Amino acid sequence: MYVKFRYIVSLDDFLAQIDYDYLKQLNDPQILIAQIDQPLHNFKLLTGRDLLKLYLKSEAIRLKVYDEFIVKSALDHIWITYSALQNKFTLLADDVNKINLNKIRARDENLSRIIRLDVTQAVNSVFEDHFFNGVKDFNNNDNNVGFGCL
């Protein structure tokens, strides 16, 4: 079966080719988090407009539209025209942000617990003591113990 490909050269062409049914079905924040692929240490709060922009960029790739102006104009047009989609994407962005903030909170709590670990290991040698319990004072050379002696 031969599918005729239509070149997209204007905003109207791009808006006509967008898969609006898929756009209306987006509702799982976990899937969106996987697609965003933003590391937690660089996390920034997302807006509904950011999520719509990600979708439109993927549609532009699918439709082979390389003009950023068309994509930005489509984003502005859809964001202003479809208030139901605007509300949906805003709520979806809130859900994504809550999930990411919970992940950051859990990560920070785990790091805090790790930092507070102060149980020393029972060992037989100075090397093992420094290896498992950490070197407390690098400048203290009592008993010839320092980095040069390890």
Image (cartoon, helix red, strand yellow):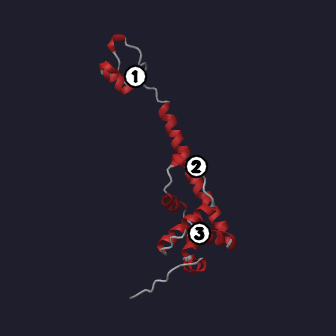
Give 107 or 67, whichever is nearer the viewer. 67
Q: Residue at x 54, y 77 (%)?
A: 19
Instruction: Look at mark 2 in the image and give the residue it sits on.
Output: 101
Q: Amino acid at mark 3?
A: Phe
Q: SS at mark 3?
A: helix
Give above or below for 23 relative to 124: below
Instruction: Give me the disc on residue 52.
Output: none
Question: How far across and down, in percent of the image, does residue 145 sit?
Answer: 34, 16
Left or right: 119 with respect to 102?
left
Q: SS at mark 2?
A: helix
Question: How far across and down, in percent of the image, does residue 30 sit?
Answer: 52, 60
Q: Residues within 10 Å of mark 1 (few under 14, many from 20)?
A: some
Left or right: 70 with respect to 34?
right
Q: Nearer the viewer, mark 2 or mark 1?
A: 1
Give the Cα separation between the discs numbered 3 and 2: 32 Å
Q: Residue at x 43, y 18 (%)?
A: 137
- Spot the residue most to the top: 142
Left or right: 113 with respect to 74?
left
Q: Amino acid at mark 1?
A: Val
Question: How far across and down, in percent of the image, does residue 35 sit?
Answer: 49, 61
Give above or below for 126 relative to 115: above
Q: Nearer the viewer, mark 3 or mark 2?
A: 3
Instruction: Give me the disc on residue 69.
Output: 3
Q: Quadrant of the N terminus?
A: bottom left
Give the Cα separation between the discs numbered 2 and 1: 35 Å
Residue 85 picture quarter: bottom right
Question: How far across and down, in percent of the image, does residue 15 sit?
Answer: 59, 77
Instruction: Look at mark 1 in the image and give the residue it sits on.
Output: 135
Q: Amino acid at mark 2?
A: Leu
| Residue 6 showing in the rendered view | yes
Q: Nearer the viewer, mark 3 or mark 1?
A: 3
Q: Residues within 10 Å of mark 2 (few under 14, many from 20)?
A: some
